[in-house]
């Protein structure tokens, strides 16, 4: 660090020398200090002055932006809760499909898997996939229906908007195939036309 304008190399010596001068001399002789004590947060010899007023305005702006973000987050959570509350699973006429979808919606893996046979066939957009791996991932990502807009085939085919984690939200179908014991031995899912 170089010398201050008064020839001092040490900040403490520099400040002491300036304080010995009158207030009017401080403002004109060394523009890094001010006539009102405590107005500036700190002094620097390179004309980079941060006032308490500037700092306060900056902090208030940061808190305001943070508060807006929290309010926005709260609104998003409220919208999600309202969407979940609006979805009426009672309109699914097949009781076993309704139980399976309720388990998916609430994130209850055990209840979901109990609705299916051990050798369930599973397809996603026509491709055969491992049922357990696929839905373990879906449960981990909290994937679920946002609404149900169409129910067909005695309540075994359901359509609606689905939140699919990293893939976003889009309209899908779930087609459940039920065996004689009431469990599902096949599930076909995929993207549905709008």
Image: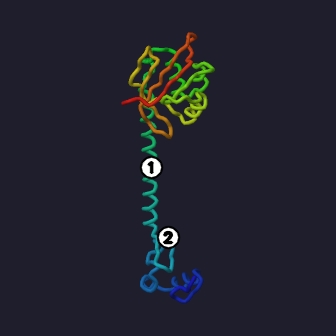
| Image mark for residue 41 | 2
Give yes or no for contact between labels 1 and 2 (Cβ–Cβ under 8 Å). no
Mark nearer the viewer, 1 or 2: 1
Indicate the secondary structure of the residue bearing disc 1. helix
Report the side of 98 relative to 110 (left or right): left
Residue density around tag 2, few if under 14, some if 14–19, many if 20 or more, within 10 Å: few
Tell me where residue 111 appears, x and y as whole percent.
59, 22
Tell me where residue 98 appears, x and y as whole percent.
49, 19
Q: Quadrant of residue 56?
A: bottom left
Indicate the secondary structure of the residue bearing disc 2. loop
- Closer to us: 104 or 71: 104
Cα separation between marks 1 and 2: 26 Å
Residue at 50 percent across and 24 percent down: it is 188
Tell me where residue 38 appears, x and y as whole percent.
48, 71
Tell me where residue 120 appears, x and y as whole percent.
59, 21
Q: Is residue 57 above or below residue 65?
A: below
Q: Is residue 128 above or below residue 25?
A: above
The quadrant of the image that shows the C terminus is: top left
Disc on the earlier residue, 1 or 2: 2
Residue density around tag 1, few if under 14, some if 14–19, many if 20 or more, within 10 Å: few
Residue at 45 percent across and 43 percent down: it is 73
- Closer to us: 14 or 122: 122
The residue that label 1 is drawn on is 67
């Amino acid at each position: 660090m170089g010398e201050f304008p008064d020839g001092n190399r040490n900040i403490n010596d520099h400040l002491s020398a300036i304080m010995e001068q009158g207030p009017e001399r401080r403002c004109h002789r060394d523009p890094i200090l001010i006539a009102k004590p405590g107005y500036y947060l700190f002094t620097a010899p390179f004309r980079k002055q941060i006032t308490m007023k500037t700092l306060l305005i900056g902090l208030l702006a940061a808190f305001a932006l943070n508060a807006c973000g929290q309010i926005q987050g709260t609104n998003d959570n409220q919208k999600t809760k309202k969407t979940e509350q609006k979805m009426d699973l009672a309109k699914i006429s097949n009781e076993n499909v309704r139980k399976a979808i309720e388990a998916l919606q609430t994130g209850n893996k055990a209840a979901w898997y109990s609705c299916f046979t051990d050798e369930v066939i599973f397809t996603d957009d026509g491709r055969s996939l491992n049922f357990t791996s696929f839905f373990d991932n879906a449960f981990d990502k909290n994937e679920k229906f946002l609404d149900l807009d169409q129910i067909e085939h005695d309540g075994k085919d359901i359509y609606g908007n689905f939140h699919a984690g990293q893939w976003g939200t889009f309209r899908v179908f779930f087609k459940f195939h039920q065996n004689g014991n009431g469990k599902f031995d096949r599930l076909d899912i995929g993207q549905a036309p709008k």
